[in-house]
Image: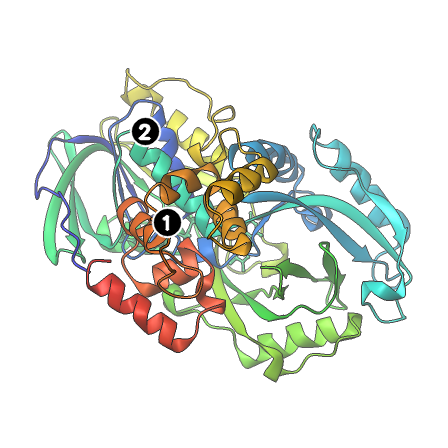
């Protein structure tokens, strides 16, 4: 679908160019634009195409990081939970997690001490505290488990969190482009000259800026070396993690965190009402992160841990889908992945005139703080940089969101639309559903399954959707719901300009 874009080949210099449209790049662009800078955000493929759509989808403090004494990271991440619950209320939800007790792996006192810290390291007003519970037969676990410890964290639609940030950046005047790859950058007088290739328009474009931010996640070191002709000041470790999607293996809205003999933990998380998501692994990775796939060993490992704990016994035939992402960890590649810090580092290469900032590591959970600290580093260069606090601002989709009230209003205004469709639209778009449905024509039928033309138009015109995969995997999670014929109809619509 060659949608015509107003993308001049050369334009006025920008203040800052952010390379990479994962959560960190999108968050930094959002922060910089809302603080008054002229921003360009360029993503080589689709927003959230890489690690930021292949996560465990948790906004969490990371209970297991306490074992590695990562108190700074855990405290910051715990505090972010309640901030993001408000900021992105349409896509961040509280979730209870259960740790089935296994005396031989971690003693009761150790887990209870860890949960005490977890409850108290940061202020909590919405999320409930931890407690010990007795497991019953209905919980779906094997009889080997009778006690569990329950605590709170949050679930997030990771790729939509990226899109929310991209949209917010755009609303604040940022030029945002997906399918627009940074090919090379050079210092040219007072500016960075950034050469881009726009894969939509199939043409080269040049942009200039005073500051350059490398938020390319797993590509951070490679980008510095190949596109900037600089040496990476820090080492990185690339670690693959995989997840399996299977039909729901237990009832209930809680997630489980399973302990394993190798001291690792594996999550089993309720997913899209009908499925369970099992993950993750930690495998050293080399190769192209765009092509990470779950190996046979990872699949067997995850199935075996699930089967040790749950009555529902899974085989490979039960797997509906699997996905893998590559963690861009900051630190010595020789340290075992399990022991490697999940914290981030913001490296400034400062020649006193043209800053080049590179992001190493990080988590979805801490993206807002990372973005704030990154933009703070631009203070010496831009006198017009405002000091607004992103802690208080809420994404448009979440402003005044009361899902129950909204659902009632929508069912009364749009009686011909199925209730399940309205629920899905609220979960994805929050109050922006009004904008989408303002173009719904009464009496209209869905194009495919429960998808109406007005939703496709919205995704193409306001969320930079280009391909079938952008729409099915990242803007929505309809990939699990549609038949091959329905996907083909969708592809035709997108190719014909929706
Ligand atoms: C298996 C797994 C589970 C995880 N679970 C969680 C979790 O539950 N909670 C949590 O908080 N964190 C989690 N994380 C960590 C989190 O997902 C990552 O830290 C985060 O997504 C990294 O985001 P990023 O923006 O740095 O990188 P990415 O999302 O990889 O984004 C980098 C982007 O840069 C683009 N790019 C590269 N080169 C160029 C170029 N030349 N020009 C333009 N664009 C370019 C790429 O296309 C890519 O989109 C998990 C990670 C993994 C792997």
Instruction: Report helix, strand or loop for mark 1.
Output: loop
Question: Viewer-proximal residue, 419 or 284?
Answer: 419
Mark whose residue sits in front, 1 or 2: 1
Disc 2 within 8 angstroms of ligand 1 (CB): no
Which quadrant does the C terminus fall into?
Answer: bottom left
- The disc, 1 or 2, on the residue closer to the chain's N-terminal end is 2
Tell whether 175 sits left or right of 475.
left
Residue 279 - label:
none
Which residue lies most toward the front here? 443
The residue carrying mark 2 is: 33
Task: Decide: is 288 above or below 155.
Answer: below
The residue carrying mark 1 is: 442
Mark 2 surroundings: few (<14), some (14-19) or many (≥20) residues within 10 A: many
Question: Viewer-proximal residue, 188 or 364?
Answer: 364
Disc 1 within 8 angstroms of ligand 1 (CB): no
Q: Residue 271 appears in which quarter of the rendering?
A: bottom right
- Residue 41: give x, y in percent of width and height: 28, 41
- Residue 75 visible (yes or no): yes
Mark 1 surroundings: few (<14), some (14-19) or many (≥20) residues within 10 A: few
- Residue 330: give x, y in percent of width and height: 49, 49
Which quadrant does the N terminus fall into?
Answer: bottom left
How many marks overall?
2
Tell whether 276 sits left or right of 454.
right
Instruction: Report helix, strand or loop for mark 2.
Output: helix
- Residue 328: give x, y in percent of width and height: 46, 54
Does the residue at mark 1 contact the one at mark 2 (Cβ under 8 Å)?
A: no
- Residue 132: give x, y in percent of width and height: 88, 48
Question: Viewer-proximal residue, 255 or 483?
Answer: 483
Which residue lies most toward the top here? 383
- Residue 331 visible (yes or no): no
CA gap, disc 1 and disc 2: 38 Å
């Amino acid at each position: 679908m060659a949608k015509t874009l107003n993308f001049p080949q050369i334009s006025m210099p920008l203040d800052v160019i952010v390379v990479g449209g994962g959560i960190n790049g999108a968050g930094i662009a959002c922060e910089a634009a809302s603080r008054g800078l002229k921003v360009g955000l360029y993503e080589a493929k689709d927003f959230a195409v890489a690690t930021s759509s292949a996560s465990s989808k948790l906004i969490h403090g990371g209970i297991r990081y306490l074992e590695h004494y990562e108190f700074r990271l855990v405290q910051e991440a715990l505090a972010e939970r309640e901030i993001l619950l408000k900021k992105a209320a349409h896509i961040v939800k509280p979730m209870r997690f259960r740790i089935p007790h296994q005396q031989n792996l971690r003693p009761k006192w150790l887990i209870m001490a860890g949960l005490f810290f977890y409850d108290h390291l940061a202020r909590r007003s919405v999320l409930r505290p931890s407690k010990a519970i007795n497991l019953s037969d209905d919980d779906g676990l094997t009889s080997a488990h009778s006690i569990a410890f329950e605590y709170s964290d949050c679930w997030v639609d990771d790729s939509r969190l990226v899109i929310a940030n991209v949209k917010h950046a755009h609303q604040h005047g940022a030029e945002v482009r997906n399918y627009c790859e940074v090919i090379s950058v050079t210092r040219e007088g007072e500016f960075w000259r950034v050469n881009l290739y726009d894969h939509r328009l199939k043409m080269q474009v040049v942009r200039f800026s005073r500051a350059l931010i490398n938020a390319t996640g797993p590509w951070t070191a490679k980008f510095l070396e190949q596109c900037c002709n600089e040496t990476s000041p820090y080492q990185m470790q690339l670690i693959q993690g995989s997840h399996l999607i299977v039909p729901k293996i237990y009832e209930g809205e809680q997630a489980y965190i399973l302990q394993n003999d190798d001291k690792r933990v594996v999550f089993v998380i309720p997913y899209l009402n009908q499925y369970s998501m099992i993950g993750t692994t930690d495998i050293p990775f080399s190769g192209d992160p765009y092509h990470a796939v779950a190996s046979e060993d990872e699949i067997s490992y995850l199935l075996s841990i699930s089967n040790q704990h749950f009555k529902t016994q899974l085989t490979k035939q039960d797997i509906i889908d699997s996905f893998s992402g590559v963690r861009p960890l900051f630190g010595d590649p020789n340290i075992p992945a399990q022991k490697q810090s999940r914290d981030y580092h913001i490296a400034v290469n400062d020649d006193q005139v043209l800053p080049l900032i590179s992001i190493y590591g990080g988590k979805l959970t801490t993206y807002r703080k990372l973005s704030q600290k990154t933009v703070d580093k631009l203070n010496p260069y831009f006198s017009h940089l405002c000091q607004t606090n992103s802690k208080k601002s809420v994404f448009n989709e979440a402003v005044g969101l009361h899902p129950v009230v909204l659902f009632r209003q929508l069912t009364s205004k749009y009686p011909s639309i199925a209730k399940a469709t309205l629920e899905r639209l609220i979960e994805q778009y929050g109050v922006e559903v009004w904008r989408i449905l303002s173009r719904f024509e009464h009496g209209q039928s869905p194009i495919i399954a429960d998808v109406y033309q007005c939703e496709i138009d919205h995704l193409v015109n306001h969320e930079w959707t280009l391909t079938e995969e952008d729409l099915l995997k990242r803007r929505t999670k309809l990939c699990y719901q549609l038949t091959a014929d329905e996907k083909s109809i969708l592809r035709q619509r997108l190719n014909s300009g929706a």
